[in-house]
């Protein structure tokens, strides 16, 4: 579990601001579940989704998302991982492959988290931010994610990563504003799809 507790370049829970926010969220928490719920709710509700609110700058590091109070789902997942890891809760990064529109191509990755719960194992949580049609919650053992899988080209990718995917970092660190990120959302090919 060490990798899922570590501080790193993008999950920088050793940053003073992130560490301070993690401590503040832990004050008075009566249980590990309450602590996780507090961190989840903070990121979901207090860090605004860049595209939903048309906000700049583009953030990638957890500390950037916290400082600017905005981020795409990817940066928000980095911040949630950082806050939980700072509180000794093993946390990883997960991805879904979803249609960018209502159905069909193009597709993109959507970033979320998996947290280790002693009673349940890995449990996915999605702090991208709620809006009409999106109602993500922390309700273990039942997962309440932002987006369902609706068609064959969409996927719940099974991996739990300790670090962000390079393709995600590349987009977030190379695009000048939220609109450019929206035009260049990362994707991954599905192995074996479309083969006869």
Image (cartoon, rainbow, N blue to C red):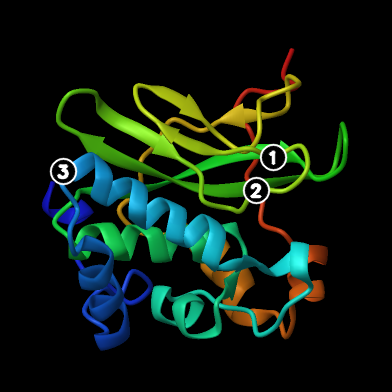
Give the secondary structure at mark 2.
Answer: loop
Local crowd at mark 3 within 10 Å, few (<14), some, or many (≥20)? Answer: few
Q: In the image, residue 150 lies at what x, y percent?
A: 74, 22
Looking at the rendered structure, the secondary structure element under dot 3 is: loop
Between residues 180 and 23, which one lies in front from this camera angle?
A: 23
Helix, strand or loop at mark 1 = loop
Question: Residue 42: where, in percent of width, then height?
Answer: 44, 61
Task: Mark 2: give few (<14), some (14-19) or many (20+) Cα within 10 Å.
Answer: some
Q: Quadrant of the C terminus?
A: top right
Q: Are marks 1 and 2 in contact (CB under 8 Å)?
A: yes
Q: Residue at x 62, y 67 (%)?
A: 48
Q: Is residue 28 left or right of residue 189?
A: left
Measure the C-alpha gap from mark 1 to mark 2. Answer: 5 Å
Q: Which residue is mark 2?
A: 130
Q: Which mark is residue 92?
A: none
Name the residue that disc number 1 marks.
134
Residue 31 disc label: 3
When asked about the image quadrant of residue 102, the answer is top right
- For image coordinates 21% across by 79% down, the residue present is 14
Q: Are marks 3 and 1 in contact (CB under 8 Å)?
A: no
Up-down relation of residue 61 to residue 182 (above or below): below
Q: Residue at x 38, y 73 (%)?
A: 10
As drawn, 130 above or below 76: above
- Mark yes or no: residue 102 visible: yes
User: Vertical placement of 17 versus 183: above or below?
Assistant: below
């Amino acid at each position: 579990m060490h990798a899922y507790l570590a501080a790193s370049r993008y999950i920088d829970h050793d940053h003073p601001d992130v560490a301070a926010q993690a401590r503040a969220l832990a004050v008075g928490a009566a249980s590990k579940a309450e602590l996780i719920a507090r961190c989840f709710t903070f990121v979901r509700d207090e860090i605004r989704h860049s595209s939903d609110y048309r906000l700049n700058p583009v953030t990638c590091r957890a500390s950037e998302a916290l400082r600017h109070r905005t981020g795409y789902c990817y940066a928000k997942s980095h911040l949630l991982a950082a806050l939980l890891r700072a509180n000794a809760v093993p946390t990883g990064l997960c991805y879904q492959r979803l249609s960018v529109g209502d159905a069909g191509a193009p597709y993109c990755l959507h970033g979320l988290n998996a947290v280790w719960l002693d009673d349940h194992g890995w449990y996915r949580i999605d702090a991208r931010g709620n809006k009409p049609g999106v109602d993500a919650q922390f309700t273990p053992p039942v997962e309440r994610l932002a987006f369902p899988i609706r068609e064959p080209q969409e996927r719940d990718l099974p991996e739990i990563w300790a670090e962000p995917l390079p393709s995600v970092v590349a987009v977030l660190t190379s695009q000048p504003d939220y609109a450019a990120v929206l035009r260049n959302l990362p994707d991954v090919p599905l192995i074996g799809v479309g083969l006869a």
